Amino acid sequence: MDIARTPSIADGNPQMADAPPVPAQPPLIRRADYKPFPWLVPETRLHFDLGIENTRVVSTLKVVPNPDAAADDVIRLNGDGLQVSSVKLDGLPVKNWEMDGPDLVLPLSAGAHEIEIVNDVSPEKNSQLMGLYASNGMLCTQCEAEGFRRITFFPDRPDILSTYLVKMEGPVAQFPVLLSNGNKVSAGESAGGRHWAEWHDPWPKPSYLFALVAGDLVARTDSFTTMSGREVDLAVWVRAEDLPRTEHAMDSLKKSMKWDEEAFGREYDLDVFNIVAVSDFNMGAMENKGLNVFNTKYVLADPDTATDGDYDAIEGVIGHEYFHNWSGNRVTCRDWFQLSLKEGFTVLRDQLFSQDMQGEAVKRIEDVRVLRAVQFPEDSGPLAHPIRPDSFREISNFYTATVYNKGAEVLRMMRTMAGPVAFRQGTDLYFERHDGEAATCEDFVKAMEDGAGLDLRQFRLWYSQAGTPKVEVSLTHKGDTATLALKQTVPPTPDRIAKKPMPIPLRLALFDRDSGSHDGEQLVILSEAEKTIAFEGFARSPVLSINRGFSAPVSIEREVSTEDLVFLAAHDDDPFARYEAMQDLVVAHLVAVCSDSLTGAAQEAGRKAIAGALRKVLTDDRLDDSMRGELMMLPGQTYLAEQFLVADPGRIHAEREALKVALGVALESELIALHERASTLPATLDHASRGARKVKAQALVYLAAGNPDVAAKMAAAQYDAAQTMTDRQGALMVLTGLPGVARTDRLIDFYNRYRGNELVVDKWFALQASSLHPDAIEHVKALANHPDFNLRNPNRVRSLYMAFAGNPHAFHAASGEGYRMIADLILALDPINPQTAARFVPPLGRWRRIEPQRAALMRAELERIAATDGLSRDTYEQVTRSLG
Ligand code: ARG
Ligand code: ZN
């Protein structure tokens, strides 16, 4: 809103002031154009006179010429919507600065200088939630990636590292707690009911890691003794009413600190570690040095209001942000193109942490499910980009599943090839070499080559090539030899058509059909376009298990018999591969059904085979429930749609539901028995009880399809007896999809029971927006007018509209109404919060892979958005790429 989006002479645009305005085209920023900044800023002092309506900022920067850059006689300080009050150079007021677009440019002679700038910002008007903003009467900041320039003028780029001394002052009653990065060095009272605090962060950091919090908060406190014996004071800051829901967050923090010492040899480096929970937040959380700021969603939990899934997500995100202290803060990024250096690595670290806390098998399955549901579609659509992008207009659009989750998979492949011990030697060397630096992805790869002893020359292609590689697999058998033929192709993406083969590590095993076992797993690295491998000593054709543990983020294509998949679903000793066999069984069936390539009899046989495999899953008492719950899950709509060049979402949804009906009918007694048995476990947080809750929810899902009346009764009873949010939400999810009184009564009860608890009311919105109810669209329209709906709160917006955009029968309604609703939302939200608005573009951007009638409707909505004046840089970039 306050960003100068019109091109100016300063942007290098030749339009003169009196020329007619041209449509704004935000500049493309390229990785290849990186140049070091001509100045360094060794010290930064900030003074804040805090107020919700107005905060005055006085910034004092020590600057010196950068010996590693070409000298310049000016310094460009980035700003975004800032008005300058005064500028001093070396203690004297100066007037020779000028504004160049949003930036301040000041002439500067060679040598060291001190620059002082005074400016004001209005936190309450900051609806973008970038920079300094107000949330429920408190003040907080979000600076990554380019929010610091919305607070004060600064070289706002991650390769400018500075130490920060921050003094904050404000009314005690309004802001009793004053926090910033590092350690508190002094505090005191001043006249008129005011007070101040001064914080010092000794670790040089880029501006995106700056944070400030001021408000009426209370803390759960604790302490942690590091491996070298240093005491660290820990605090989780929340509103007073939320204090009882902070125990899990604190436990997760202590576990994270311990785990990083053991798994990566990383010790914490300040005397305090603060976490603050904020209700208005664009993303999940932020790793500001010593002062992590979190979305409340990833902090607050108790069994009555948070699901088991919420507990795990909190543990994972607390771990993630904590682990950034080394992978991100101590070693940061040279420029934003290197984002995966910190995010991919930190996601891998949080995944390994959660595997160690929750169990490896289930966590791996969950991570792959997310990758396939979110990253695969990104990689095959108009927004595809390599994990290290080459260009962007708005960096916020590149906080993607590709940079984060595929980035983690790329590092995980290095770990698979090196083995965990050598991989650790690689990361040790990386931290040792680059501590205190702003590094690149190349630095990481080099450290991994040197430390782990890997040759990663060809592997570097994973950083520059986008698109999910396809591996075609066939196994033939002759005499006593089984021959495996592998062929890889990396599909073209908008950025690049021709691709080179990449090293693809595939863990595989060949099973003997009679004994149901194998002679050991092998790691095959497919580096060439095609390769065949012969395995001797197989009198009968073996059953192939490939890409075990999902060792490479690729899609495997192979002709495989239903019989072999049923065998693997029952016998594979790799839990991921067992899950995969179940998924493949269903995917192959549904793809065939949706392509009309099955006779009625073949379809019947397919359903029978799936029902048989699922029956084994339901009744195998060697399986633990947590794993059983995974094996029970049908492949999701987006992953199914990915299997088609051009998908019909209506047909896929209908056939997937029809299969659920068939399975619910065929397995009704087994499902009821499973639900009954699982209902006997206590409402505790231990592994067995959590597993039981998971299978209960899954059982209800199938029963709701097969026998809605019975399911409605069971779900209502589960809801009424629920002692945990997991059971309550699981039951309500099923009820919400089933028209009837049980539904209405429980939805009203749920709202009344939890009104006032924002996070639970979010669940109430999301359940209705994602429901199978035929009137879901009407429900969403009504909810948009509910007094609790609020476009300014990103959690609330996501709870209604992200859930809706992920609801296939509603979003993809053949009328196009769902598409129109999302486009209307984007247009309404863009002036308020462009970053969050732009996140709703990708669902519409899938049009090229959708059947022609719907595709035309989706495209028309994108064109309507593109034709709107004054779009943000964020939305402009996503919409034009999606149409391009
Ligand atoms: N670095 C944060 C994380 O832990 C994400 C912050 C992204 N913020 C943004 N405005 N794009 O992943
Ligand atoms: Zn992160």
Image (cartoon, rainbow, N blue to C red):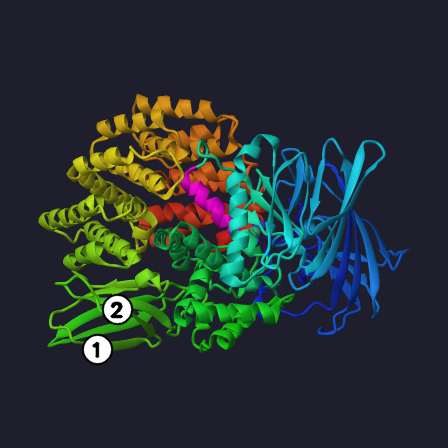
**Residue at the spot 72% in from the left edge and 58% down from the top edge:** 202
Quadrant for the N terminus in the image: top right
Q: CA distance from mark 2 to mark 1?
A: 16 Å
Name the main secondary structure of what is drawn in magenta. helix
Q: Which residue appears farthest toward the front when viewing the image?
A: 229
Label 2 is placed on what type of residue? Gly
Residue in front for this viewpoint, 696 or 686: 686
Q: Sequence-wise, which precedes: disc 2 or disc 1?
A: 2
Q: Which residue appears farthest toward the left when viewing the image?
A: 601
**Label 2: few (<14), some (14–19) or many (≥20) C-alpha neighbours in 10 Å:** few
Q: Of helix, strand and loop, which one carries label 2? A: loop
**Residue at the spot 49% in from the left edge and 25% down from the top edge:** 755
Q: Which residue is mark 2?
A: 520
Label 1 is placed on what type of residue? Ala
Relative to 429, residue 20 above or below: above
Magenta run includes residue 36: no
Q: Is residue 293 left or right of residue 787?
A: right
**Residue at the spot 52% in from the left edge and 52% down from the top edge:** 256
Magenta run includes residue 314: yes
**Residue at the spot 44% in from the left edge and 55% down from the top edge:** 351
* Residue 118 x, y percent position in the rendering: 81, 49
**Label 1: few (<14), some (14–19) or many (≥20) C-alpha neighbours in 10 Å:** few
Q: Which residues are magenta?
A: 307-319
Residue 17 visible (yes or no): no
* Residue 107 x, y percent position in the rendering: 82, 64
Q: Which residue is mark 1?
A: 534
* Residue 34 x, y percent position in the rendering: 62, 69
Residue 229 visible (yes or no): yes
Residue in front for this viewpoint, 614 or 742: 614
